[in-house]
Amino acid sequence: MKSISVPISLSPHVVDGKPRGYYIIAQRLWQQQPILFRHQFVGFTKNLVSTIAHPGHLDSVLKMAVYNPHLNDAPVSWISKAKMYPAGTGVRIYLPGSILKPTSAGMKKIETMGSLCIEQEIYYLNVPKLNADILFGRKELE
C-alpha cells in the first residue's frame, strides 16, 4: 500500500442555523483535477475512510464490501455512500448527520492531517482524527 500525507479540513455544514453534517476537504491531492465519480463510499477501520476513486462496477455498498472487505490488512465496514465534489487540486466529501453531526451550529473548521492511500485500484482518504470514539459519540470532535 502506498500513502502520502495530505492536509484535511473538517468543516461543519450548517443550514438555517442547524448543524446538518460535515464536509471533509482534502487539498493538494494532484496537480490537475481528474474526472472522478461523484458517488463515493465511506467506511470505518480504526478511523473513517472515504474512497476518492474506485472501479466503475462498484456502484453499491454491498458490491464494495464484497470486492474490498480489507484496507491495509484491516477489516473495513463500509457504512454508506457519500457525495464528492471537486475542489481545485482536491475534493470535498459530504458526510451527512447520520454519519457525523456537529454538536452545535457555532462549531469551527478543524485542520488536521490525513493520508491518501492506494490499494487494489481504490484510492481512499484516511482521516485519523475521526476515530471510533468520535464516530460512536463517546467523545466530541475538537
Image (cartoon, helix red, strand yellow):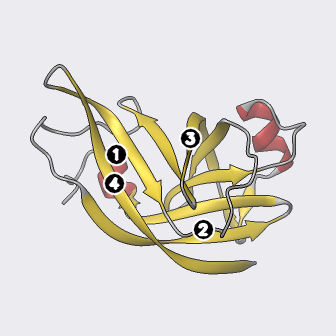
Residue shown at the point (83%, 38%) measured from the top left: 58
Residue 103 coordinates in the image, percent (x, y): 16, 39
Q: Which residue occupies 9% across, 41% down? A: 106
What amino acid is found at the position of numbered circle 2 in the picture?
Answer: Leu
| Mark 3 or mark 2: whose residue is earlier in sequence | 2
Q: Secondary structure at mark 1?
A: loop
Q: Secondary structure at mark 2?
A: loop
Q: Which residue is mark 2?
A: 29
Mark 4 highlights which residue? 10
Residue that carries the numbered disc 1 in the rendered image: 136
Residue 70 occupies which quadrant of the picture? bottom right
Question: Mark 2 and mark 1 in contact (Cβ < 8 Å)?
Answer: no
Q: CA distance from mark 3 to mark 2?
A: 13 Å
Check if mark 1's residue and mark 4's residue have beta carbons within 8 Å. Answer: no
Viewer-proximal residue, 118 or 132? 118
Name the kind of residue labelled 4 in the image: Leu
Does any portion of residue 51 appear in the rendered image? yes
Image disc number at residue 42: none
Nearer mark to the viewer, of 1 and 2: 2
How far apart marks 1 and 2 lie (CA) works out to: 29 Å
Badge 3 is on which residue? 85
Mark closest to the chain's N terminus, 4 or 3: 4
